[in-house]
Amino acid sequence: MASIIVPPKAAAHEYWLAPSAYSAPVDQTLAVQAYVGSDFKGELRPFATTRTVRLEVRAKDRKDVKSQAINGDLDLVHLSVEDEGGIVVAFETNFVPVELPPEKFDEYLRREGLDGPLKAREALGTAAGPGRERYLRCAKTWIAGNDGSRLKKPFGMPLEIIPRSDPLISGKLAVQVLYNERPIEGILVKAWNQPLANGAVPRDQMARDPVKPVAEARTGEDGGAVLQLDGTGEWLLSAVHMQPSADKQAADWESRWASLTFARVPPK
C-alpha cells in the first residue's frame, strides 16, 4: 500500500467526537459527529464504512451501532436518551498510512512528546529518512449522566483514556491510559477547553477560534496521570502512542490516538 503524502499541518491533528448536546432530558434525540483538527477547532468528518472498526454506545446496555451508520453521513449515530445515567460513544478506525519529510516528522514527534521514536530517528541520523507512519483513531465522548461507572468502563480499544475521578467536577482530574487494555507508562495526555454555546450545546466546531492546551501530564507506571482542569466548558483530552510498525511495508512507525470529550455546564 502506498503512503499518502500529507501537508505538515495535517500529520498531527487531533480527532474527537462531539454530540449535539453534552446532556439532555430522557427521550430527547441527539446526534454525534466526528472532527479532525488542531487546537480544538476542527473539520467535520463523515462516516466512512471502510475505515470503521468500532462504533459502540454504552447506556443502559452496551450496543454495537456500526451497522446502523450510513457511509458518507455527517452524523455517526443518532441516540435517544434512555435514562438519566449518561451515554458513552466509542469510535475506532483502522490504520491509514502517511509520509512526511524528515524534518517535519521530527518536529511532529517533538510536539507530541514522542521521545522514544525521536531518539531512535536521531540515532540513525540522515539514514532515518522520511517519516513513514500509519495511524488509527480511538475516540470517545461522554453525554453526561448520574452513572459515572458507564464512563469508567473501558471498551477494549487499542488506546483508551479512562477517567478515574468525576470529569464534571472542576479541578484535578485523574485519568488512566490503557494500551491494548493494559496500563501504559510515559504517555503524554493533553487537555483543551472551549466555551459552550448555550447550556450543554457546543460551539460550532469549525467556526470557533483555536485554543492552546491548558494542561498536560505524563502517565506513570500504573498508566495514571492527573490534569488540572479548572472551570466549565467543552473539554478535549488527547493521547498518542507510537511504536515501530508491525507492517514494515506499510510504514516504519505506527501510532494510536485516543481522545475523550465531555462538558461542564456553567451554573444558571
Image: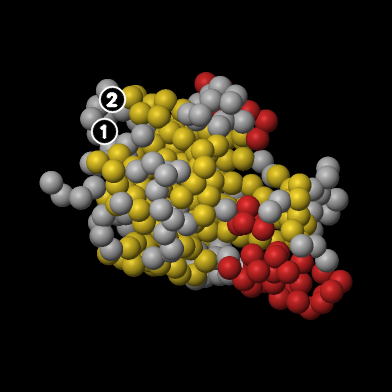
Residue neighbourhood size for the residue with mark 2, other residues' Cα within 10 Å, grouped as few (<14), some (14–19), many (≥20): few
Helix, strand or loop at disc 2? loop
Residue neighbourhood size for the residue with mark 1, other residues' Cα within 10 Å, grouped as few (<14), some (14–19), many (≥20): many
- The percent coordinates of residue 172 (x first, y second) are 31, 65
Q: Nearer the viewer, residue 181 or 86?
A: 86
User: Splitting the image into 4 quarters, where does residue 121 fall?
Assistant: bottom right
On residue 24, the disc is 1
Q: Nearer the viewer, residue 13 or 208?
A: 208
Q: Quadrant of the N terminus?
A: top right
Tell me which amino acid carries mark 1.
Answer: Ala
- The percent coordinates of residue 261 (x first, y second) are 41, 48
Tell me which amino acid carries mark 2.
Answer: Gln
Q: Residue at x 62, y 40 (%)?
A: 93
Q: Residue furthest left?
A: 268
| Vertical side of 172 occupied by 259: above or below | above
Residue 130 seen in this snapshot: yes
Left or right, 240 with reference to 33: right
Q: Residue at x 76, y 50 (%)?
A: 5
Kindly indicate whether the residue at mark 2 contacts the one at mark 1 (C-beta within 8 angstroms): yes
| Vertical side of 222 occupied by 266: above or below | above
CA distance for labels 1 and 2: 6 Å
Q: Which residue is mark 2?
A: 28
Left or right, 146 with reference to 152: left
